[in-house]
Image (cartoon, grey):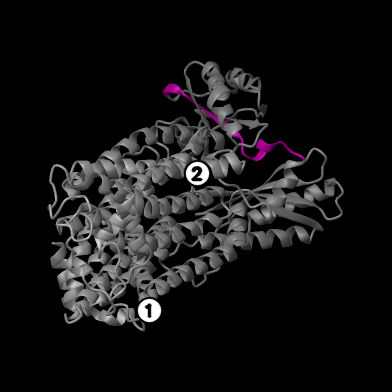
């Protein structure tokens, strides 16, 4: 099947390239236009319905008209001279608020939106006076705008509202400030725009430079990146289309995660093809490049397919997660990787068939014999001192893993950068009002059997909440339209997104609600702190479920792929140790040394999947070459040295490219994104350089052909190396007999090992 697909692609390359070009551009445009129709930012909406915060959200929507896509903006209004507001000023504030609530905000259409496909967020906002500071220094308005807070179209609507409000109050001699909700999102996006552009350009430039340096070729530097960008657009469009058809709602971070993953993985797969293509062109200089491309694509395609399916299987296990953000991320990445796999078996072979030896011009590396270098020296070291290499690798990973001791999970949202206008306004408000005043913890009470509620009957619940340490004030109950439900807002004395607020709501607040809820009624606790508390519970449960399921599924795939029971054990132990090392190093950098509350709550699961799946990805490619070299005959250590020599350049280059792709996230202003970028980049570097090129080959050298038990490889010779002229000197593999005089390495003359 794989060879049939790659064979067709190399026989009809221009047709394949044309189809991918049209399909990729079309799906990319459609995905970009429709992505915001299938994403939402409400964490409570991703919780299973049986969780308390999710039940509170249902009551808020059904009984109090809460809108899931409603974005709150807090508007601060104060005198320009810094004096307290007078009665006349307060009347002007109320009049301006009424004027804003009666004026429609039209969304400006830009080149980013496509009429008929993109959402039109034009609307009449709801604006009302909320409170006045105790010292009268400012008044606060609450504004509600409906729409996806991550959509650039919604950002344009906010900017129009912002400018109109600023003008309205400015005419009355008042100054304004904006914070909370949509204001935070827009200010963060504006603050990061330049940084993200620069980082993106640096990442692309780094990938191009790495490829150019390795292959000494212009085409080899740019073609993989262009091809992967087209395929990445097609994959993102496919995910968005699938979400529209199935009614799936994506987390806003999913599309950007897909883009980062596919650029790294796609360039990796292309690099594996390029390295093997160049190697075979050297060996078969008289053969037509299309025949070589077909053969190489079939060989590498098998390993790439296995590696890709490992990633797909790992992320597909997230489908059993209870937390919606995980459940959405898993299938999305899995579908995207499948699209990239199809491209690896069709588009990439077609590009090799079209370019041939021109792919490596102006360099003549495709016609020159391979010279020994750092890759050959690494292979010699592993083969000569496998026990030392194995112990050193395990010691390094084990030392990093120690950092996981005392690790804590952080469920914060990352907040707003400290130098934005929204952050400055929030700081001014915090100087006069308690932290929880604009983000209360809300208790929803519903009457059983459709009976009506009596506000006086809820007074005992209100008193119980006021007695909880950490709750500053509890507002009087507000009844719904049909009086079957009531809402009580509890204002915490701590920041609602802090770990202290989460612990407070999960423990004392919910305990007080359970004990004081009137008979014949049901109560649910909602709000930011309640959502974080339930997310913590859901994530903890998912970690205990997904980890073993993913590990078992990957191990099963390895058994089928490698046709061995011993090799999968070695690989799984290796990638497990790599995960522990990466997680420990992340905790050390961010929590123990960086002073952050803990590591982001999604980090363990996402890191486990990426490090285990991608770490297995590289080790599969190395193991495939190890098996091939051992099957060629000769001593095992010579086979290990040859395998490392031929795979080290591809794995090292691919690892550097993928780490650069994920590392671009490490400069993000959002703390959680920064942690994900750093940890994933570190895990990939450890997987490629330590696991794939040192630990696994060293284990293979020590285990010998027992690595493939119960199916043993060819026995071309004994595993020991003999002195020069000995009967058991290693026979050279055909592709190792070539090379200029004086360029022979250990793999060309195994007898050198005995003289060390």
Q: Residue at x 54, y 24 (%)?
A: 507
Q: Residue at x 38, y 64 (%)?
A: 374
Tell me if residue 435 is in the magenta stretch: yes
- Foreground: 209 or 38? 209
Residue 180 x %, y %: 63, 48
- Foreground: 515 or 251? 251
- Foreground: 636 or 135? 636
Viewport quadrant of the N terminus: bottom left
Residue 346 x %, y %: 23, 69
**Res. 217 mark:** 1
**Location of residue 717 (image quadrant):** bottom left
Distance from label 1 to label 2 (Cα)? Answer: 37 Å
Q: Residue at x 34, y 82 (%)?
A: 361
Residue 660 x %, y %: 46, 61
- Please state the extent of the stretch shown in magenta in the rendering: 432-449
Question: Which class describes the residues within 10 Å of circle 2: few (<14), some (14-19), or many (20+)?
Answer: many
**Location of residue 296 (image quadrant):** bottom left
Q: Is residue 725 above or below residue 614?
A: below
Viewport quadrant of the C terminus: bottom left
**Location of residue 213 (image quadrant):** bottom left
Q: Is residue 551 above or below residue 52?
A: below
Q: Secondary structure at mark 1?
A: loop
Left or right side of 8 for 341: right
Left or right side of 46 for 281: left
Q: Is residue 626 above or below residue 42?
A: below
Question: Which class describes the residues within 10 Å of circle 1: few (<14), some (14-19), or many (20+)?
Answer: some
**Res. 585 mark:** 2
Residue 89 x %, y %: 82, 50
Q: How many marks?
A: 2
Left or right side of 546 for 715: left
Residue 333 makes an appearance in the image = no
Q: Confirm or deny contact between disc 1 and disc 2 (CB under 8 A).
A: no
């Amino acid at each position: 099947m794989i060879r049939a697909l790659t064979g067709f692609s190399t026989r009809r390359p221009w047709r394949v390239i044309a189809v991918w070009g049209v399909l990729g551009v079309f799906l990319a445009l459609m995905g970009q236009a429709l992505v915001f129709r299938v994403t939402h930012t409400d964490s409570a909406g991703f919780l299973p319905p049986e969780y308390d915060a999710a039940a509170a959200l249902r009551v808020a929507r059904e009984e109090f008209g809460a809108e899931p896509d409603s974005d709150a903006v807090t508007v601060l209004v104060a005198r320009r001279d810094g004096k307290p507001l007078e009665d006349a000023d307060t009347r002007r504030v109320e009049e301006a608020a009424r004027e804003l609530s009666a004026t429609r905000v039209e969304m400006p259409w830009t080149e980013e939106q496509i009429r008929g496909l993109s959402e039109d967020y034009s609307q009449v906002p709801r604006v009302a006076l909320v409170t006045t500071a105790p010292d009268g220094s400012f008044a606060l308005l609450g504004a509600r705008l409906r729409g996806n807070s991550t959509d650039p179209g919604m950002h344009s609507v906010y900017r129009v509202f912002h400018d109109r409000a600023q003008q309205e109050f400015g005419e009355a001699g008042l100054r304004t400030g904006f914070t909370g909700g949509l204001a935070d999102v827009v200010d963060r996006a504006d603050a990061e725009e330049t940084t993200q552009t620069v980082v993106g350009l640096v990442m692309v430039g780094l990938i191009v430079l790495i490829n150019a340096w390795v292959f000494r070729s212009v085409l080899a530097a740019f073609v993989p990146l262009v091809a992967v960008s087209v395929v990445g657009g097609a994959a993102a469009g496919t995910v968005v289309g699938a979400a529209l058809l199935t009614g799936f709602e994506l987390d806003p971070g999913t599309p950007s995660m897909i883009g980062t993953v596919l650029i790294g993985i796609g360039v990796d797969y292309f690099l594996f093809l390029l390295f093997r293509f160049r190697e075979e062109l050297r060996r078969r200089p008289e053969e037509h490049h299309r025949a070589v491309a077909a053969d190489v694509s079939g060989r590498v395609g098998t390993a790439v397919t296995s590696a890709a399916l490992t990633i797909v299987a790992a992320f597909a296990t997230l489908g059993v997660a209870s937390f919606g953000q995980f459940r959405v991320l898993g299938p999305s990445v899995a579908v995207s990787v499948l699209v990239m796999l199809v491209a690896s078996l069709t588009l990439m072979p077609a590009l090799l068939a079209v370019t041939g030896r021109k792919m490596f011009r102006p360099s003549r590396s495709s016609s020159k014999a391979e010279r020994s270098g750092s890759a050959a020296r690494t292979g010699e070291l592993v083969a000569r001192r496998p026990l030392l290499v194995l112990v050193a690798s395990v010691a390094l990973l084990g030392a990093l893993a120690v950092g996981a001791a005392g690790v804590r999970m952080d469920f914060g949202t990352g907040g707003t950068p400290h130098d934005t206008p929204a952050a400055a306004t929030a700081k001014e408000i915090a100087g006069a009002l308690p932290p929880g005043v604009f983000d209360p913890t809300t208790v929803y009470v519903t009457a059983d059997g459709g009976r009506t509620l009596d506000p006086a009957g809820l007074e005992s619940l209100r008193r119980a909440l006021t007695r909880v340490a950490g709750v500053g004030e509890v507002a009087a109950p507000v009844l719904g339209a049909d009086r079957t439900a009531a809402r009580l807002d509890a204002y915490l004395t701590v920041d609602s997104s802090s770990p202290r607020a989460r612990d407070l709501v999960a423990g004392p607040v919910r305990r007080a609600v359970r004990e004081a809820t009137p008979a014949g009624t049901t109560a649910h606790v909602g709000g930011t702190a309640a959502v974080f508390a339930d997310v913590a519970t859901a994530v903890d449960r998912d970690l205990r479920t997904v980890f073993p399921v993913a590990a078992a599924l990957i191990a099963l795939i390895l058994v089928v792929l490698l046709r061995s029971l011993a090799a999968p054990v070695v690989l799984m132990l290796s990638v497990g140790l790599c995960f522990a090392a990466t997680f420990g190093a992340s905790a050390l950098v961010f929590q123990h040394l960086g002073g952050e509350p803990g590591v982001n709550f999604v980090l363990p699961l996402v890191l486990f999947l990426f490090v285990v799946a991608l770490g297995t990805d590289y080790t599969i490619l190395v193991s495939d070459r190890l098996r091939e070299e051992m099957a060629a005959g000769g001593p095992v250590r010579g086979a290990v040295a040859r395998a490392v020599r031929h795979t080290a350049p591809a794995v090292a280059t691919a690892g550097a490219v993928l780490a650069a792709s994920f590392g671009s996230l490490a400069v993000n202003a959002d703390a959680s994104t920064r942690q994900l970028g750093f940890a994933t980049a570190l895990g990939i570097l450890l997987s490629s350089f330590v696991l794939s090129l040192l630990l696994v080959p060293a284990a293979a050298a020590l285990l010998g052909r027992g690595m493939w038990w119960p199916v043993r490889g060819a026995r071309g010779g004994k595993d020991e190396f003999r002195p020069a002229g000995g009967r058991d000197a290693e026979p050279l593999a055909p592709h190792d007999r070539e090379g200029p005089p004086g360029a022979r390495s250990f793999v060309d003359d195994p007898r050198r090992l005995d003289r060390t």
